[in-house]
Amino acid sequence: MAVHIRLRRTGTTKKPAYRVVVADSRAARDGRFIEVIGHYNPLTDPPTIKIEAEKASAWLKKGAQPSNTVKNLLARVGVRNG
């Protein structure tokens, strides 16, 4: 089972907010997930990024692959890959 760390869209039409989730790569974007490790709101000024660093680094050590966007968010928060 390939595990990815990616964004799950929440919010309403034209007002997106995202949850940072750990999910099986075969699951739908807004479908089943293993764990929520944070959230991201791009509409605030500055954008709100809250990610639990301990959980994120633990999943990265277990081999979870972050999406490109999540990789950028983790770098902004200060979580190192692996």
Image (spheres, grey):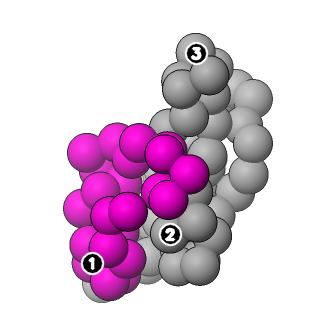
Give the number of the disc on residue 26. 3
Residue 6 appears in the figure: no
Mark 3 neighbour density, 10 Å: few (under 14) some (14–19) many (20 or more): few
When the figure is inspected, residue 15 is found, relative to residue 34, above or below; the finding is below
Which segment did they paint magenta? Answer: 60-82
Quarter of the picture holding the N terminus: top right
Instruction: Name the residue that disc number 1 marks.
Output: 76
Residue 36 appears in the figure: yes
Q: Nearer the viewer, residue 1 or 52?
A: 1
Mark 2 neighbour density, 10 Å: few (under 14) some (14–19) many (20 or more): some
Query: Which is closer to the viewer, label 2 or label 1?
Result: 2
Q: Residue at x 61, y 46 (%)?
A: 22
Give the image location of residue 75, x and y in percent.
26, 72
Proximity of marks 2 and 1: CB atoms separated by less than 8 Å = no
Give the image location of residue 27, x and y in percent.
63, 20
Mark 2 or mark 1, earlier in chain? 2
Mark 2 or mark 3, earlier in chain? 3
Give the CA distance from mark 2 to mark 1: 14 Å
Give the number of the disc on residue 57. 2
Give the CA distance from mark 3 to mark 1: 27 Å
Mark 1 neighbour density, 10 Å: few (under 14) some (14–19) many (20 or more): few
Mark 3 or mark 1, earlier in chain? 3
Q: Secondary structure at mark 3?
A: loop
Question: Which amino acid type is marked by label 3?
Answer: Arg
Q: Is residue 34 left or right of residue 22?
A: right
Question: Which amino acid type is marked by label 1?
Answer: Arg
Q: Quarter-wise, where is residue 65 in the image?
A: top left
Q: Nearer the viewer, residue 39 or 34?
A: 34
Q: Residue at x 32, y 73 (%)?
A: 80
